[in-house]
Structures are given as C-alpha cells and as structure tokens.
C-alpha cells in the first residue's frame, strides 16, 4: 500500500479503492484468500513481520464460520476427555494472552457452572479435570481458579438449575468475545501495518508459472473488474470452502475437510435465572448456556452438514434438540415460544475417515504446502487463530528464500486495546465530555476500546443518539461501520458490525429502514441501491424463518 495508508486502520470506501489499486500494480510477498479470523490473522502476522500482504474476501469479514461461533474464547474443557492436552494447553495460553494483552477490550471473562449429579465419583472426576484445565494455562493467570460449590450455593447462584437432580457443582472461568467484531478488528490492525485488504473481491483462479503458483485472478464484485494479483506466495484460508476450491484449482489436497453444523438459540434474560453461564455434558458433546447482552445463547449442536455452505440455517429439529438438552437441568423449562432468534455456523474439521462422528474429530489444524507458492490452512479452533496464523506464515515464508523476522503477534495488541484500561477508569469523564450516559460509554468501550473517540467525534452530531430506545447501539456506530469498518451493505451491519440479527425478536426488520438510510448516506447510494440492500437482508431473514417451520 502507499505510504499514506501506513498506521491508518480505517477501512473506508476510499481505503478500498486504494487497496484495489495496489492489487492492480503491486507484487506481494503474500496474497491471502479468505477474510475469516484465520485469513485476517495471517495478514496481520505477515504484515507485522515486514512482509507485503494483500487479502481478498468474496463476501464480508467473518461472513462464514467466524461470525457464527458460540462466542467463547476457551480451552475446550471437553477435549481433555479426548486426551488432547496439547490443544487445550495451547488454547488456554492464547485465552490468557487475549484477555491480558492482545484484545482486552473485546475478550472478557465469563464464569460457568459445571453441575454435578453424583456426589462422589463425578465430583472427583470433574474436579481433577478442572484442576488440570487450570494447570495447563501456565504461569499467566488472568482468571480465577475453579471452585467447588455446594448445592445451597448453587441454588443462590443459579436458581433455574434443578436441585432435585443436581447435588452441587464447580464454578470455573473462560472468556467471551463478539467473534465477528474481533475478526474485523484483526483485519483493521493488519491494514494499519500496511496490508491491502478488500472485501467483495472473489478469487476465481490461480496464476501459474510452470508448477509454481504466482498469484491469483480475482474479480471485484462491485465493479466486475478482473485483476491479476501477483504474489510470491498465495495462502488459502477458506475454512469449509477449502475442498471446493482445491477442486476448482486442480490441486490435490493433503487433507480432507469435514463440515459440521453448530446451531444456537437465543432466549430472553428472564428465561433462565442464573448469575453464571452453565456447561452441560451431552451424549456426544457439550451444551453451553452463555450470558449475552442481557440474554442467553444456548447451544450448540454438532452434526454432519452437506447443504449450502454460504448460508447454513438452524432448523426446527436443531431448536428442539437444544431445548431438550437444556431442559434436562432447567426448571422452569424452556419453551419454543421464548426463542428470540437462532443462528448456525459450520466447523471445518480435518478428517481422513468419512464415517467418523464430527464430535469425535480433532480440532487440531493442518497447514498444507502442496505445490510451490501455495499454502493452505484448515481445522483448528477460533481461540487458537493466532497460533494457526503464525504456523501458516512460517510455512509460507519458506518459499520466499530470504530471512524473515519471527512472529511478534504474541505481544501485538489489536487496535483499540492500547489505553483501554485507563479509559475504563474514566467512564464518567467520557460521559460528561460527550454528553451521553455512562452505560453508553461502557457499551462503546467494550466494542471499540480506545477508538471510542473516533466513533463519537467523526460521525455527524445527529447520530449521537440511540438507534432504538431499548438498545445500547448508537446511530453513530452504523455510520462508523461504513466509514471505518468496511461495511458495504445492510446485512454487513445487521449480522456482523452489530448483532441486531439475533438480539431482536424480529431480527431487526423494524430497524432496517433507519440503518439503511445511514449506510446509504455514508456510501452515497441512490434509493435503488438502498432498497436492494434492504431486500437482500429481508430475504435472508425470511429463509431463516422458513427453516424453523420445516
């Protein structure tokens, strides 16, 4: 990118044009295909090592798996039963880094209760597992140790748990994140350090020089321009689309991706009375009951998936399964009528056997280097994206044939982290300065960190009011999503820059007129483009609702 872009993280419409210009003119060390958390992480890792980097994404940041997770940064307690200690240790160490250094403004502690239904054997078994879980995180300890709680304590902490079945439990800590926001912020940090990043840019073919891959042919889906991007190494981080792209490129993969669907439901805060999240072991996996913005996210399922990769949808059967599992330990029981919304995501799992259960497949990642100039990454967990990115760049740089700096992302904070701790101590001052409530300041700090001043000062003054009286979002956040966060449609805003799609009973349909007006103003749309973007969102919501009736 041009020097003018250095140290600027704003993914504005103007930035996109500069990025496309760079795709036309420059030759990059790395071209990354895919804008999920792995692609964004790879771009950041490579750019922070001083490499020239481009990233292209055919849709929006985190539009696939990376926006549809359980919103947890965790070690994976259940993987201890599979004796996958390496993965658990790695994930726990990454969790500590994210809370303390990398993204403290986005990743925050959340407590869980593990209910016990048997007094002696289960307590010993689970307690030993949680002790190991705590020990594996190493010397950095941002979170408290687990603690045994009696039935009486449990009744006070979580009145909704059935005391006729539950004899007590353990309380332990993991962490929570808005996955889509975090992914986008990682991408913005990569842009800050010089990466050329563009969404709505689809990779259509690889460029070859003999057996070596020397870049890719991409199409700007907004202008329909085809660009040949030159790169010394092309890295594919496309998750569940990996096998499909391998076939289209005519390259034999070193692994196979199995796709598993995980569905979640969202219910009101008053549907479950608890001061803590809950984790429940199921027949082949675990069920989480997770606090989220005054509501509860309950899930997930783990089933084979062979349908549309672009739009996985939770079905009536998924919802019934989740409610049935949760109701094993809840009183009063959940009812379908309480469900505010649903969402489903796809896990790209590495598998060599077609008949194995997806819940039994390892969450380890694999880096493949099938031909010179071409590297791919698949598998893994959201929590370990940074390690996966480092491993991928390490492999890719073997094709550059020069000395490359080691990864520094274990000490590199993403944008918004610097100064966050100080600003958390100045909530009232910020509220007075910007003439907003302290609750709004806290809401903004926990989404933007030290970028709060940009959000509040660069939007038109008329947008410094709430989008809706019952929601914490400001209209300024919609404006900022377009001017700084790369949003290019109403769906980008509703699904990923905010979480209005699953936080509202009507999936935000009642608000899209106001949202679309702000997006249209920021992007200079005419009425036709605005109506088209609104229709795309309405149609997507309608498909979700139809699936729930089947």
Image: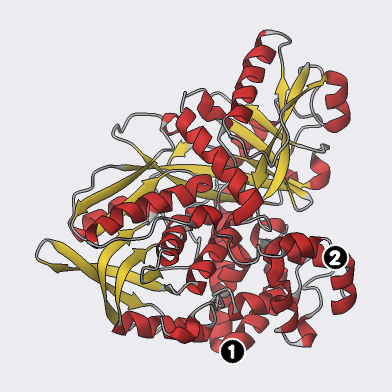
Name the spot of residue 432 as percent of width and height, x first: 90, 75
Q: Is residue 455 above or below residue 47?
A: below
- The residues bearing labels 2 and 1 have C-alpha atoms spaced at a distance of 39 Å
Q: Is residue 446 visible?
A: yes
Instruction: Name which quarter of the figure residue 257 lies in.
Output: top left
Q: Is residue 294 above or below residue 413?
A: above
Mark 2 surroundings within 10 Å by alpha-carbon count, few (fewer than 14), some (14 through 19), many (20 or more): some
Q: Is residue 366 above or below residue 53?
A: above
- The disc label shown at residue 427, or none: 2
Q: Earlier in the sequence, mark 2 or mark 1?
A: 2
The coloring applied to the image is secondary structure
Which residue is painted at 67% across and 55% down in the image?
104
- The disc label shown at residue 527, or none: 1
As rendered, which of 541 and 116 lies closer to the eye? 116
Name the spot of residue 489 as percent of width and height, x first: 55, 75
Mark 1 surroundings within 10 Å by alpha-carbon count, few (fewer than 14), some (14 through 19), many (20 or more): few
Q: Are the residues tagged 2 and 1 within 8 Å (C-beta)?
A: no
* Residue 260 relative to residue 119: left or right: left
Residue lying at the far left of the rendered structure = 210
How many numbered circles does the render carry? 2
* Residue 199 relative to residue 490: left or right: left
């Amino acid at each position: 990118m041009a020097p003018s872009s250095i140290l600027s993280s704003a993914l504005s419409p103007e930035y996109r044009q500069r990025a496309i210009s760079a795709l036309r003119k420059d030759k990059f060390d790395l071209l990354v295909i895919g804008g999920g958390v792995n692609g964004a992480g790879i771009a950041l890792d490579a750019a922070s090592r001083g490499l020239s980097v481009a990233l292209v994404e055919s849709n929006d940041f985190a539009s696939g798996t990376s926006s549809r997770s359980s919103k947890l940064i965790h070690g994976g307690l259940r993987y201890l039963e599979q004796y996958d200690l390496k993965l658990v240790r790695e994930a726990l160490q990454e969790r500590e880094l994210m809370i303390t250094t990398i993204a403290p403004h986005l990743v925050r502690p959340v407590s869980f209760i593990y209910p016990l239904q048997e007094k002696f054997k289960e307590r010993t078994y689970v307690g030993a597992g949680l002790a190991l879980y705590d020990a594996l995180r190493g010397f950095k300890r941002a979170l408290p140790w687990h603690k045994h709680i009696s039935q009486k304590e449990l009744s006070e902490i979580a009145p909704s748990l059935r005391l006729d079945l539950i004899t007590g439990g353990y309380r332990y800590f993991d962490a929570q994140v808005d996955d889509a926001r975090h992914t986008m912020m990682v991408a913005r940090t990569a842009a800050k350090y010089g990466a050329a990043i563009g969404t709505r840019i689809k990779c259509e073919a690889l460029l070859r020089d003999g057996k070596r891959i020397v870049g890719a042919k991409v199409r700007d889906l907004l202008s329909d321009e085809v660009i040949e991007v030159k790169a010394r190494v092309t890295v594919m981080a496309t998750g569940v689309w990996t096998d499909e792209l391998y076939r289209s490129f005519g390259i034999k993969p070193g692994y196979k991706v199995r796709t598993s669907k995980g569905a979640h439901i969202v219910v009101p805060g008053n549907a479950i009375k608890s001061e803590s999240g809950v984790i429940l072991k199921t027949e082949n996996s675990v069920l989480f009951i997770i606090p989220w913005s005054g509501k509860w996210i309950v899930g997930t399922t783990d089933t084979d998936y062979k349908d549309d990769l672009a739009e996985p949808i939770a079905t009536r059967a998924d919802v019934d399964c989740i409610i049935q599992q949760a109701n094993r330990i809840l009183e009063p029981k959940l009812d379908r009528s309480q469900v505010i919304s649903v969402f489903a995501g796809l896990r790209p799992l590495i598998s060599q056997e077609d008949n194995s259960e997806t819940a039994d497949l390892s969450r380890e990642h694999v880096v493949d280097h099938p031909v010179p100039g071409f590297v791919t990454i698949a598998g893994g967990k959201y929590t370990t994206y940074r390690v996966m990115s480092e491993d991928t760049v390490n492999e890719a740089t073997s094709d550059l044939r020069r000395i490359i700096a080691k990864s520094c992302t274990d000490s590199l904070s993403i944008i918004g982290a610097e100064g966050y701790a100080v600003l958390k101590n100045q909530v009232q001052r910020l509220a007075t300065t910007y003439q907003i409530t302290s609750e709004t300041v806290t809401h903004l700090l926990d989404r933007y960190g030290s970028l709060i001043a940009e959000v509040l000062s660069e939007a038109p003054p008329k947008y410094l009011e709430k989008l809706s009286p019952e929601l914490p979002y400001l209209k300024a956040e919609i404006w900022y999503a377009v001017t700084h966060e790369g949003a290019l449609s109403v769906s980008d805003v509703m699904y990923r820059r905010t979480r209005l799609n699953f936080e509202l009973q009507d999936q935000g349909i009642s608000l899209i007129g106001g949202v679309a007006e702000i997006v249209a103003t920021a992007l200079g749309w005419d009425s036709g483009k605005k109506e088209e973007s609104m229709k795309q969102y309405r149609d997507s919501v309608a498909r979700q609702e139809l699936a729930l009736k089947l």
